[in-house]
Every structure is written in structure tokens, then in C-alpha cells.
Image (spheres, rainbow, N blue to C red):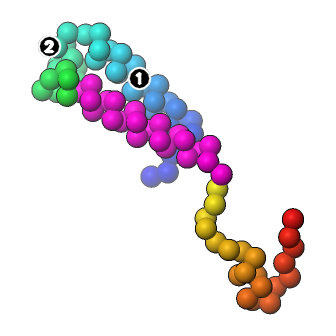
Amino acid sequence: MIMTRYEIERELDKLYKDLEIAHNADELTVCKLFNADSKKEIVKVIADEIDTYEDLLKEFDMPYDDGMDYINLQLSQGMAVTRW
């Protein structure tokens, strides 16, 4: 599933809130709230998810390059090529 920048940012906001809750709550509360075996475990899971979503967000800032050599493709097909 492809996510929009807005959806990624919204998910990151939610994850940062969850991470804050996990850091500030006691062990038993965290385990019950997140259905986890330990506080340490859920903090790591949330942090890993944050890393994943931040990497997805970075892709929006990268220039798009699909690797295709369009100039040579056009030339091989006998098409006119305009160079900027």
C-alpha cells in the first residue's frame, strides 16, 4: 500500500505519542496498554516503526529518478530529442 506524506506524518505523530506514553508509564501499565511482555520490548518496537516511517518520509524529499535513459530510448526509436 502506498501512503501519502500526510498519512505517514499522521502515523509518526501517533507513534511519537505512543513512545512518550511508553517511556513515562510504569511497566504494568505499558504491558497492559500495548499488550506487550515488557516495557523495553514495546519501546523498541515503537522506535523501529518510527525509523521505518521516517525513512518513508525521506523518500518524498528525494529527487525522482527511475533510472531510464530516455534520450537514448527516443534516439533508438527515431524520435526527436530535445535537450535542455
- Does residue 25 appear in this view? yes
Dot 1 or dot 2: first in sequence order is: 1
Q: Is residue 45 magenta?
A: yes
Amino acid, disc 1: Tyr
Q: Is residue 48 magenta?
A: yes
Could you say where residue 78 lies in the image, as x and y percent from the top left?
80, 90
Residue found 20% across the figure and 23% down from its top = 40
Quadrant occupied by the C terminus? bottom right
Q: Residue at x 72, y 81 (%)?
A: 72
Identify the residue under disc 2.
28
Residue toward you, 40 or 15 = 40
| Residue 79 vs residue 3, the one in the foreground | 79
Name the amino acid type tagged 2. Answer: Leu
Residue range (magenta): 42-63
- In the image, residue 18 lies at what x, y percent? 35, 21
**Residue, disc 1:** 16
Q: Position of residue 35 (x, y in %)?
A: 18, 26
Tag 1: Cα neighbours inside 10 Å, few (<14), some, or many (≥20)? some
